[in-house]
């Protein structure tokens, strides 16, 4: 199975991944082509060139795509829309399905992978906080759901960093507080607001990114194997800054 994965929730990431069944029953993922750029305001200008280069790579051009996976946010309106529109165009022109995965889920899964690499064997709780601009963050709590997926323990909220603990505590009592019930924090918001790391028992931030194209594929495949539908409705959590002007009143 050959999958194109796009994430435009912070910068822009694009990867073409081959998912082949392994002898153990799980899929072995191989990245055939990938590219990324860090500018958070040049998604539309970058995606066309990145897509063209990725699809013309010799390892990719030899076989058609089977599916597209795209980040659904939450993220600023313009960048997220650019990635989702690109994914939908590829899906329609090639007649293949397009699946959506929250970029926060991918950050949480990466943080859990890092915890596992550090030898943490219990079921840790991860607080993800990503940059929402306007001096706010998107935040939610997660726990592992198998080796490739996550379960979200709270709704995603958008708020100032100082209110993250309060918002999460309202939805998941006992999971976050001064006693360090959250094992680790992750995401681009923690890089901007290091005080969020104090909410974790280890006082350390992991995976300071906003989404991950390869991890999206892992999550999507795990959910598709369970028969879940992965919609591509974007998680904006805010109205767009630019509004269509109202019609002028007629002067009589």
Image (tube, helix red, strand yellow):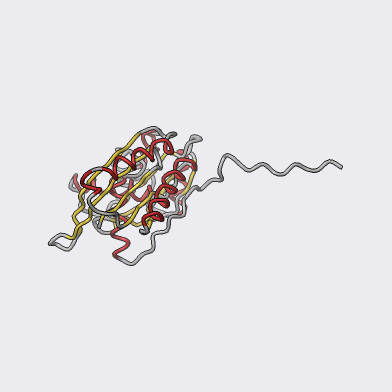
User: Residue 187: where, in percent of width, then height?
Assistant: 35, 41
Displayed quadrant of residue 138: top left
| Residue 35 in view here | yes
Closest to the observer, 142 or 20: 20
Q: Furthest-left residue in view?
A: 23
Classify the position of the C terminus by image quarter: top right
Establish if 210 lies above or below 228: above
Closest to the observer, 82 or 170: 82
Task: Kindly identify the residue that appears in the image at 28 percent across and 51 percent down.
Answer: 124
Q: How many marks?
A: 0
Task: Kindly identify the residue that appears in the image at 51 percent across and 35 percent down.
Answer: 134
Q: State left or right for residue 19 relative to residue 50.
A: left
Displayed quadrant of residue 56: top left
Q: Furthest-bottom residue in view?
A: 227
User: Residue 180: where, in percent of width, then height?
Assistant: 33, 45
Q: Furthest-right residue in view?
A: 252
User: Residue 36: where, in percent of width, then height?
Assistant: 32, 37
Classify the position of the N terminus by image quarter: bottom left
Establish if 222 lies above or below 185: below
Task: Kindly identify the residue that appears in the image at 32 percent across and 61 percent down.
Answer: 223
| Residue 186 in view here | no
Task: Kindly identify the residue that appears in the image at 42 percent across and 46 percent down.
Answer: 139
Q: State left or right for residue 4 relative to residue 9.
A: left
User: Residue 240: where, in percent of width, then height?
Assistant: 55, 43
């Amino acid at each position: 199975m050959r999958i194109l994965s796009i994430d435009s929730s912070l910068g822009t990431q694009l990867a073409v991944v081959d998912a082949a069944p392994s002898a153990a029953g799980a899929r072995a993922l191989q990245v055939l082509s990938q590219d990324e750029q860090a500018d958070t305001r040049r998604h539309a200008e970058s995606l066309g060139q990145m897509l063209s280069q990725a699809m013309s790579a010799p390892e990719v051009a030899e076989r058609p795509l089977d599916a597209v996976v795209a980040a659904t946010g939450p993220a600023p309106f313009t960048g997220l829309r650019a990635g989702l529109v690109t994914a939908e165009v590829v899906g329609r022109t090639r007649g293949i399905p397009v699946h959506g995965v929250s970029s926060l889920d991918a950050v949480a899964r990466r943080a859990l992978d890092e915890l596992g690499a550090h030898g943490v064997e219990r079921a840790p709780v991860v607080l993800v906080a990503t940059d929402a601009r306007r001096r706010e963050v998107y935040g939610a709590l997660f726990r592992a759901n198998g080796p490739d997926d996550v379960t979200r323990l709270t709704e995603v909220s958008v708020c100032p960093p100082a209110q993250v603990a309060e918002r999460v505590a309202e939805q998941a009592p006992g999971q976050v507080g001064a006693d360090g019930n959250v094992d680790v924090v992750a995401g681009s918001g923690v890089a901007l607001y290091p005080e969020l790391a104090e909410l974790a028992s280890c006082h350390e931030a992991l995976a300071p990114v906003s989404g991950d194209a390869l991890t999206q594929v892992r999550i999507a495949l795990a959910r598709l194997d369970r028969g879940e539908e992965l919609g591509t409705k974007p998680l904006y959590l805010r109205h767009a800054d630019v509004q269509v002007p109202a019609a002028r009143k007629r002067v009589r």
